[in-house]
Image (cartoon, grey):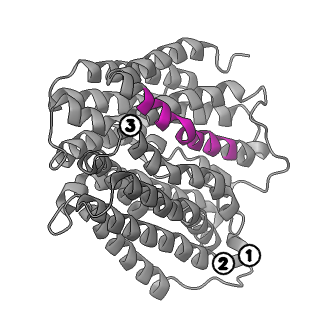
Amino acid sequence: MLVAAAGNTALQSVMPAIGREIGIADFWVAIAYTWSAILWVLLAPYWAEKSDRHGRKALTLVGVSGFIVSTLLCGVILDIGLRGLLGGAATFAVFALFRAIYGTFGCATPSATQAYLASKTRRSGRVAALSALSSSFGLGTIIGPASAPLFVFEPFGLSGPLFAFAAIGAVVFVAVLLWLPNDKGERRLGRGAAMSYPSQASTATGASVIAATSGRRLARLKWNDPRIRGWIAAGIAAGHAQAATLTCLGFFVIDRLALSPNGAESSIAIVMMAGACATLAAQWGVIPRLGAGPRGLMIWGSLVAAAGLGGITLANELYGITVGFAVASFGFGMTRPGFTGGASLAVPLAEQGSVAGVITSANGISFIAAPALGMALYGINPNLPFEVSALILVVLAWGSRRLGRS
């Protein structure tokens, strides 16, 4: 999970520069990249149900293979496009197809590794083991942007991070193949659960851990269940605001700072790394000590995130954009645990697995429309996606006062 999250966020930090260098419209760059996220959302539940039948190690290798093949092929086609050997439209059409490989098969790894750990640990230590696995996701969102500029080297240039992470993925594949004991045919069952797409806009909330450690679902919980629909709607609204602005961020940095595409990846990486650190600071450091309830996290998190997005629109230098995005990410780091905790507390213990599945789906659904909507607004005015998202968050903070009271 750490390698997948790092690889995806590293790619996220260089894609705006690659798109500008190749000469394709920003909107299509975002669509080509986020296409794999849509497939991930649709297929992750399918793979989560297959681990006991096919073996957790086997499915882990399937997911890692999907990451390696997709990342390597994407690196090859982008390198061809950057060298001017293929037109921009054709380059990104093929890139989208290769990204689909990861969206289709990469989502097998989180559920398979969760199930493997669950089958190898006692019940008393299972939550801790799965939480550590989930935490590796968050660390990856820092490592990815931090390391991406280091892998922009000759002869590959901007496509270098893809080749580097494909190589790292190959090392992980060999390690799993040789040293992870085979569990095929084991009698001891271990459940895995679908996990959100690896991105800064879908940081781990613990919902997948709840789903993986709860008992078998007695009945599927509906999205419009009156006990949770307010919390889920709040989570989707905040998720759309975060996904839309994150998609536009790299392009905004290039345009606002008037940077050349080749070399802009370092500035984009600094901003993204600051955001990832702020998110983890909120979730790992501040929230456990704050003692705020889910409603308070939603209200204050939304207001803090809105203030950060407003600050981005006013910034004219890298420092200002970095601080603004860090503040916004800190706020988003509060809203996700807020709506997750609120929805979880709204149902009894027997339904925790079901509500966790709904939460994970709500986290993922933001990638279906938000990136396209964000880039469409960006095409009108670069400030617009940040301003609209800030307005949504202010309205969300006002509406969150009623959450949990009905």
Q: Residues within 10 Å of mark 2 (few under 14, many from 20)?
A: some
Figure disc tally: 3
Q: Is residue 72 visible?
A: yes
Which residue is located at x 32 percent, y 25 percent?
382
Q: Quadrant of the N terminus?
A: bottom left
Which of discs 1 and 3 lies nearer the camera? The answer is 3
**Crowding near pointer 1: few (<14 within 10 Å), some, many (20+)?**
few
Q: Nearer the viewer, mark 3 or mark 2?
A: 3
Q: CA distance from mark 2 to mark 1?
A: 6 Å
Q: Position of residue 247 (x, y in %)?
A: 39, 38
Residue 396 within the segment the image draws in magenta: no
Q: Residue at x 29, y 39 (%)?
A: 250
Q: Amino acid at mark 3?
A: Leu
Specify which label sits upstream in the sequence, 1 or 3.
1
**Tag 1 residue:** 53
Q: Which mark is residue 55?
A: 2
Q: Are marks 2 and 1 in contact (CB under 8 Å)?
A: yes
Q: Amino acid at mark 1?
A: Arg
Q: Which residues are magenta?
A: 357-376
